Amino acid sequence: MNKQAFSLIELMIVVAIIAFLATISVPQYLKYQAKARQAEVAVNLASLHTAMQAYFIEHGSYTNVLNGEGGIGWKPEGYSGGGKNENFYYTYGFNFSGAQEGTHYFTGKLETSKDSLGQGTAENGHFIVKAAGDVYGKGKADVWTMDESRKLVHEVDGLE
């Protein structure tokens, strides 16, 4: 009778190899995932910029109201009230005293606080709108800005 099976040592070697490969690949996967989320930022801020420009052409000034009465009529695709159930990751908009969710800013799936946006502005012929996301969940937000000239700036790199 010829029994063929793996020995315990052979199985342990295979497990060790798999663990080693996982140790190498998981951090790379997380970086790749974070970069994909940053691509969302560029698309949404460009869309927001276009809406701001359309509002400026019509009214002669910019506003910090993104959605609702007197606003530019912009919100992230599929917005449903903010938080974990959203289709987008970052928080977008303006942060100032009295800013309201769904009107001045929109909280994404990462649930990054509006305070991470810092101060955005919308005055007469100038605006700076922001996006922030705590991509790794470690309390350090990845912050992006876009102004009226469509200049996209990576203000704080939260991926380091």
Image (cartoon, rainbow, N blue to C red):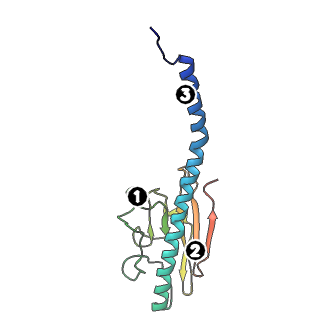
Neighbour tally class for label 2: few under 14, some 14-19, many 20 plus, Cα within 10 Å: many
Q: Is residue 5 above or below residue 87?
A: above
Amino acid type, mark 2: Met
Which residue occupies 49% across, 60% down?
Answer: 113
Q: Residue at the location (62% across, 66% down)?
A: 154
Q: Is residue 104 above or below residue 6?
A: below
Q: Residue 58 at x, y = what percent?
A: 45, 91
- The tag on residue 15 is 3
Where in the figure is residue 150, as x and y percent of width and height? 58, 78
Image side of residue 81 versus residue 105, left or right: left
The amino acid pointed to by label 3 is Val
Q: Residue at x 36, y 64 (%)?
A: 81
Classify mark 1: helix, strand or loop. Answer: loop
Count the labels in the image.
3
- Residue appearing at x 46%, y 80% in the figure: 51
Q: Position of residue 87 (x, y in %)?
A: 40, 61
The image quarter in which residue 99 lies: bottom left
Is 27 or 101 nearer to us in this picture?
27
Marking on residue 83:
1
Q: Nearer the viewer, residue 134 or 65?
A: 134
Which residue in the structure is indicated by mark 2?
Answer: 146
